[in-house]
Amino acid sequence: MLNILWPIFIIISIIYAVISGNIENLNNSIFVETENVVKFSLTLLGMTCLWSGIMEVALNTKIIDYLSKMLKPIINFLFKDIETDSECNKNITMNIIANILGLGNAATPLGLKAMNVLQKHNKEKDTLSDNMIMLIVLNTASLQIIPTTVLAIRNSLGSNEPTKIIFPIWLATICALIVGILVTKILIKCDRRKL
């Protein structure tokens, strides 16, 4: 759908610029914004590389084992019957940590690894298991203590106070996470009763 909408928006913008006599402004903005996009992309790439590297170092040390033990009660509450699978626990823990650090780009591959492990345990291969649904909800409504990507965007766009949004992000993500988990647990229980 977006591959249809964006070209339509671009064509309408060009036609409007020609009709209103702003073709020079359009040309100037194309070059200026292209430069801004490159700078912005490099900023995000640098931030993603830094945190992905930190996550890789953590993965190859005892830090993840410590964090897995610390998060084990939460993971056991959210996901049923995975306490025996250390690989699954490790992948879910890494995914949660990446989301807490606001690293959506680093969390995605970790979430996919966790989803692959959960699929191995799934009895009905063509249907999402309860654990897979919970993982999707956790990724969608994740708690972000350090919203790295948002801070990088605000900083690259010249914000005077890029960290001013941290408290509202904490509030919004905590509320989203609690509601997401509660609704998912309720729906899972209702679905089991039907069976």
Image (spheres, rainbow, N blue to C red):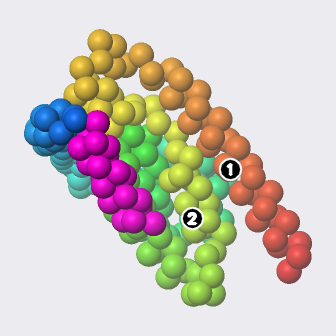
Q: Which residue is mark 1?
A: 181
Residue 65 screen position, x and y as percent: 38, 52
Q: Assign a secondary structure to mark 1.
A: helix
Say if the magenta span includes residue 9.
Answer: yes
Q: Give the amino acid at mark 1.
A: Ile
**Is residue 69 among what the camera can see?**
no
Q: Residue at x 44, y 40 (%)?
A: 100
> Which of these two is toward me, 103 or 153?
153
Instruction: Name the image quarter holding residue 190.
Output: bottom right
Which residues are the magenta region?
A: 1-20
Q: Quadrant of the N terminus?
A: bottom left
**18 displayed left or right of 70:** left
Pointer 1 local density, CA inside 10 Å: few below 14, some 14–19, many at least 20: some
Residue 91 screen position, x and y as percent: 41, 61
Label annotation for residue 83? 2
> Which of these two is toward me, 27 or 133?
27
Pointer 2 local density, CA inside 10 Å: few below 14, some 14–19, many at least 20: some
Above or below — where is 57 with respect to 160?
below
Instruction: Name the image quarter holding residue 24.
Output: top left
Residue 119 screen position, x and y as percent: 51, 79
Say if the magenta span includes residue 89.
Answer: no
Q: Assign a secondary structure to mark 2.
A: loop
Q: Disc 2 vs disc 1: which is toward the camera?
A: 1
Q: Give the amino acid at mark 2.
A: Glu
Q: Residue at x 36, y 33 (%)?
A: 150
Q: Residue at x 59, y 27 (%)?
A: 171
**Is residue 34 among what the camera can see?**
yes
Above or below — where is 193 with respect to 44?
below
Q: Earlier in the sequence, mark 2 or mark 1?
A: 2
Magenta stretch: dominant SS?
helix
Label annotation for residue 21? none
Question: Marks 2 and 1, how far apart in space?
Answer: 19 Å
